[in-house]
Image (spheres, rainbow, N blue to C red):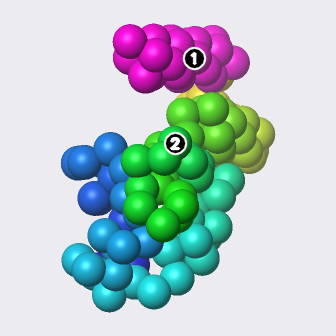
Amino acid sequence: MSQKEQVIEFVEKWGSIDSHKAFQLFGITRLAAVIHELKGTEHAMKAVYDGTVKSGFARYEADPEERFKAVKKQLSESCSKGIQAASCPRDVVAALTEALRNALTWAREVGDG
């Protein structure tokens, strides 16, 4: 399993990861580089500095807004290709976009609650 896959799986299960935990569990010495590789993808993460991590290191958690943008972009790109255009009409894209927007709203509410 790649470092990216390990980080994605851990964050999906536990909610966040920091450099200490990444090194301890997976031997990852450059967590920020792994997080950077996930930028602009459906697995995008953001750094959070809230004082819960010793030594001032960031912990990383899912970034719902960036994930939404990435998935929306993927939908638009795949539907704009001639081969897939017939199987991906505008109303389907609109419905999927709305579903993603609702999921993002829910994630914000859960995070704030």
* Residue 28, quarter of picture: bottom left
Residue 96, position as x, y percentages in the image: 54, 21
| Circle 1: residue type | Arg
Does the segment drawn in magenta span residue 88?
Answer: no
Residue 92, position as x, y percentages in the image: 57, 18
Which residue bears the numbered disc 2?
50
Q: Is residue 113 above or below residue 30?
A: above
Does the segment drawn in magenta span residue 95?
Answer: yes
- Magenta segment, which residues? 90-113
* Residue 79, quarter of picture: top right
Q: Nearer the viewer, residue 79 or 82?
A: 79
| Circle 2: residue type | Asp
Of callouts 2 and 1, the N-terminal one: 2
Q: Horizontal placement of 27 versus 70: left or right? A: left
SS of the residue at dot 1? Answer: helix
Q: Is residue 93 above or below residue 71?
A: above
Q: Main secondary structure of the magenta part?
A: helix
Residue 98, position as x, y percentages in the image: 58, 12
Q: CA distance from mark 2 to mark 1?
A: 26 Å
Q: Nearer the viewer, residue 96 or 21?
A: 21
Q: Quadrant of the C terminus?
A: top left
SS of the residue at dot 2? Answer: loop
Q: Is residue 83 above or below residue 39?
A: above
Q: Nearer the viewer, residue 36 or 84?
A: 36
Which residue bears the numbered disc 1?
101
Residue at image x 64%, y 67%? 36
